[in-house]
């Protein structure tokens, strides 16, 4: 039975659509293509650094990925515009279905943890701005172990912080790579498939739960599944 629930932040609890909106204001019509590559390279750079043991703050991966995406798509972007695009990440709101879902879980007495590649300070600020910080027992950041998801030691650090065996923790994430990393480390998993077109990686591991919206998360986890 699940005794604690950890949540990925970006794309799971926090809606990143405003980043694309800001990017569109800054660079125009190429924003969707740049945004897609930006996210792809952001993750790729964190994966590379995790493998190399060359940790940096996640914001460095994010900034470098934006510069690459703009260069790839031949978009000239000023230093000031880069800062404006980066600032958008600190000003995001929660998905509309998140506060009620977190409230329902908290009322069941289930300890909740925010679990992110971002720094603790950045994540805490984001959660407070989104008005959901009060639901979490702690913010668990990869900065404590100087690596990134899906490194197994990141999930081991989560379990240590929760004070529980990995098997008693469920990770909720919209990112398949995060779900696979958590499963590999022995956690229970719930893939929040916010995009109905999203495809889970065809590995020999599948999420324990696949959910379509945050109301599903609250309902199924509160029921003890």
Image (cartoon, rainbow, N blue to C red):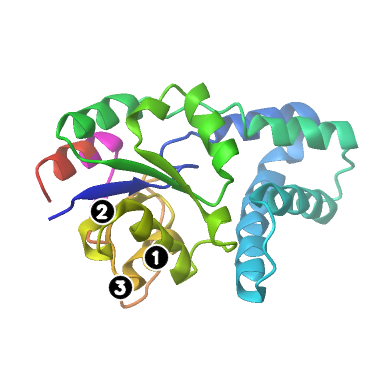
Magenta residues, start to end = 210-217
Which label sits in the foreground, 3 or 1?
1
Q: Quadrant of residue 136?
A: top left
Q: Position of residue 38 (x, y in %)?
A: 68, 50
Please name the residue that numbered disc 3 is placed on.
205
Q: Is residue 46 left or right of residue 180?
A: right
Q: How far is the residue under mark 3 from the one under mark 1? A: 19 Å
Q: Which residue is drawn at the image coordinates 17% and 53% (left, top)?
A: 2
Quick check: 144 left or right of 106?
A: right
Give yes or no for residue 13 being in the magenta stretch. no
Crowding at mark 3 (Cα within 10 Å: few <14, some 14-19, many 20+)? few
- Location of mark 1 (residue): 156
User: Badge 1: few (under 14), some or many (20 or more) residues near its Cα, within 10 Å?
Assistant: some
Viewer-closest of 130 and 201:
130
The image quadrant that residue 22 belongs to is top right
Residue 110 visible somewhere in the drawing = yes
Which one is earlier in the sequence, the residue at label 2 or at label 1? 1
Distance from label 2 to label 1 (Cα)? 23 Å
Q: Say which residue label 2 marks.
A: 210
Foreground residue, 69 or 44?
Answer: 44
Please check the rendered image and state whether residue 212 is part of the magenta-colored stretch, yes or no.
Answer: yes
| Residue at 54%, 52% in the rendered image | 117
Q: Nearer the viewer, mark 2 or mark 1?
A: 1
Q: Residue at x 41, y 37 (%)?
A: 13
Instruction: List x then y, in percent, for residue 169.
Output: 26, 56
Helix, strand, or loop for circle 1? helix
């Amino acid at each position: 039975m699940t005794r604690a629930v950890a949540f990925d932040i970006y794309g799971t609890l926090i809606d990143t659509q405003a980043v694309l909106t800001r990017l569109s204001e800054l660079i125009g019509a190429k924003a969707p293509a740049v945004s897609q590559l930006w996210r792809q390279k952001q993750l790729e750079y964190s994966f590379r650094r995790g493998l190399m043991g060359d940790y940096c703050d996640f914001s460095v991966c994010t900034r470098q990925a934006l510069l690459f995406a703009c260069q790839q798509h031949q978009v000239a972007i000023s230093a000031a515009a880069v800062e404006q695009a980066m600032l958008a990440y600190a000003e995001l709101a929660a998905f509309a279905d998140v506060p009620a879902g977190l409230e329902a879980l908290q009322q069941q007495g289930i300890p909740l943890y925010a679990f992110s590649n971002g720094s603790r300070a950045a994540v805490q600020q984001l959660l407070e701005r989104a008005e959901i910080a009060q639901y979490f027992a702690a913010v668990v950041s990869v900065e404590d172990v100087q690596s990134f998801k899906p490194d197994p030691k990141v999930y081991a650090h989560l379990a240590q912080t929760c004070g529980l065996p990995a098997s008693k923790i469920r990770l909720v994430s919209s990112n398949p790579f995060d779900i696979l990393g958590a499963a590999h480390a022995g956690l229970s998993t719930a893939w929040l498939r916010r995009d109905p077109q999203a495809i889970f990686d065809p590995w020999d591991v599948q999420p324990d739960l696949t959910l379509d919206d945050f109301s599903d998360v609250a309902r199924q986890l509160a029921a003890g599944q």
